[in-house]
């Protein structure tokens, strides 16, 4: 039996799943989900008072994956700042 090549939707879904798993691996402090037209990240542990004052957020809502990646990178910088940690 000859296997058919994957349809574009199947390949697209695999790419989506791969990117989501990679993002979750890179940012384990966050739960990441995709909704129609929106990417959402929820911090597993709420930021403490110092972290919140430094700009760390509990929720991130972005229109696309690139914007979410940038927002998570900014949050990671805040988390790595000695005064906010």
Image: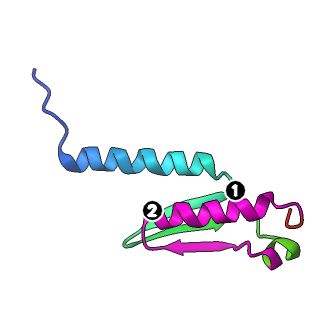
Kindly tell me whether residue 44 is visible in this rendering.
no
Cα–Cα gap, marks 1 and 2? 17 Å
User: Does residue 20 appear to the left or right of 31 in the view shown?
Assistant: left
The residue identified by callout 2 is: 65
Q: Which mark is residue 2?
A: none
Taking the spot 70% from the left edge, 56% from the top edge, the residue there is 29
Alpha-carbon neighbours of circle 2 within 10 Å: few (<14), some, or many (≥20)?
some
Asked if the stretch drawn in magenta spans residue 60, the answer is: yes
- Labels in figure, total: 2
Secondary structure beneath label 2: helix
User: Does residue 56 appear to the left or right of 68 in the view shown?
Assistant: right
| Residue 72 picture quarter | bottom right
State whether the magenta stretch is mostly helix, strand or loop: helix
Q: Position of residue 75 (x, y in %)?
A: 68, 65
The residue identified by callout 1 is: 29
Residue extending furthest toward the left: 2
The answer to whether 7 is drawn above or below residue 30 in the figure is above
The answer to whether 69 is drawn above or below residue 20 in the figure is below
The span picked out in magenta is 53-82
Q: Position of residue 70 (x, y in %)?
A: 55, 63
Taking the spot 16% from the left edge, 34% from the top edge, the residue there is 5
Alpha-carbon neighbours of circle 1 within 10 Å: few (<14), some, or many (≥20)?
some
User: Does residue 31 appear to the left or right of 68 in the view shown?
Assistant: right
Kindly tell me whether residue 74 is visible in this rendering.
yes
Secondary structure beneath label 1: loop
| Residue 78 picture quarter | bottom right
Q: Position of residue 74 (x, y in %)?
A: 65, 65
Q: Quadrant of the N terminus?
A: top left
Please say which color scheme the image uses.
Answer: rainbow
Q: Earlier in the sequence, mark 1 or mark 2?
A: 1
């Amino acid at each position: 039996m000859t296997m058919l090549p994957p349809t574009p939707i199947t390949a697209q879904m695999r790419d989506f799943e791969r990117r989501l798993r990679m993002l979750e691996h890179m940012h384990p402090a966050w739960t990441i989900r995709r909704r129609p037209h929106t990417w959402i990240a929820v911090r597993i542990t709420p930021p403490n008072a110092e972290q919140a004052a430094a700009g760390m957020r509990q929720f991130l809502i972005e229109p696309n994956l690139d914007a979410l990646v940038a927002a998570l990178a900014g949050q990671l910088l805040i988390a790595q700042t000695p005064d906010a940690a």
